[in-house]
Amino acid sequence: MAEKVTITKADVASINAHDVVGEGDRLDLKKLTKEELIERESQVSRRCRGPLKEGAREKINELMAKGTAEDTEAAKNLDAASRKRCGYDMNEVFLKGPLDGEDHEYTCPNCGVKGTYRAAGPVPG
Ligand SMILES: [Zn+2]
């Protein structure tokens, strides 16, 4: 049984089509078919970063709570150094789920990390 960790947006990239287009080029999702949306989203790399080692989350949260640029940087570095690497292509999960623009829970099929993601979409149908 894999450990259950609280995963943040930083753990995997969020899957929201608005993130992959510029402000001036806002994508009108209603004009995309499901296939077009999947094609577009597949081009964004979303790799599982793997579970954090025990105790790392607390230290990272402490650093983040301090809030200075140095502490935030230190938290990012500690996060990166505290991961058991996974690398699973999370598009395999995210793009097979509903494309409804809603938040969903996921479990990485490779390492068992759980979290939530915001689905791309919605698309008609
Ligand atoms: Zn994983």
Image: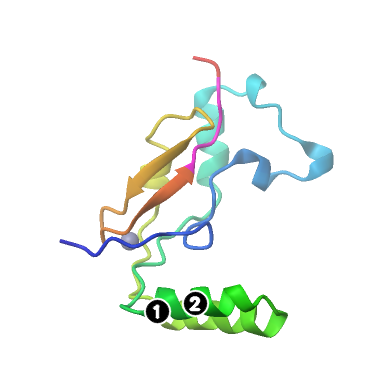
Of 115 and 97, the residue lying toward us = 115
Q: Position of residue 45 (x, y in %)?
A: 51, 55
Residue at image location 38% in from the left, 34% down from the top: 97
Q: Secondary structure at mark 1?
A: helix
Q: Secondary structure at mark 2?
A: helix
Residue at image location 46% in from the left, 81% down from the top: 59
> Which quadrant of the frame does ligand 1 lie within?
bottom left
Tell whether position 35 is magenta.
Answer: no
Q: Position of residue 39 (x, y in %)?
A: 53, 37
Of 23 and 31, the residue lying toward us = 23
Callout 2 amino acid: Ile
Please give the residue where the numbered disc 2 appears in the rendered image: 60
Instruction: In the rendered structure, find residue 116 and report the number of the disc placed on it.
Output: none
Magenta segment boundaries in residue numbering: 118-123
In the displayed structure, would residue 102 be above or below residue 57?
above
Residue located farthest toward the top when viewing the structure as drawn: 125
Q: Position of residue 17 (x, y in %)?
A: 62, 39
C-alpha distance separating marks 1 and 2? 6 Å
Q: Horizontally, is 99 left or right of 93 in the view?
A: right
In the displayed structure, would residue 3 be above or below residue 46?
below
Q: Position of residue 85 (x, y in %)?
A: 35, 73
Residue at image location 39% in from the left, 55% down from the top: 89
Q: Horizontally, is 65 left or right of 22 in the view?
A: left
Callout 1 amino acid: Ala
> Is there any visible trace of residue 80 in the rendered image?
no
Of 122 and 5, the residue lying toward us = 5
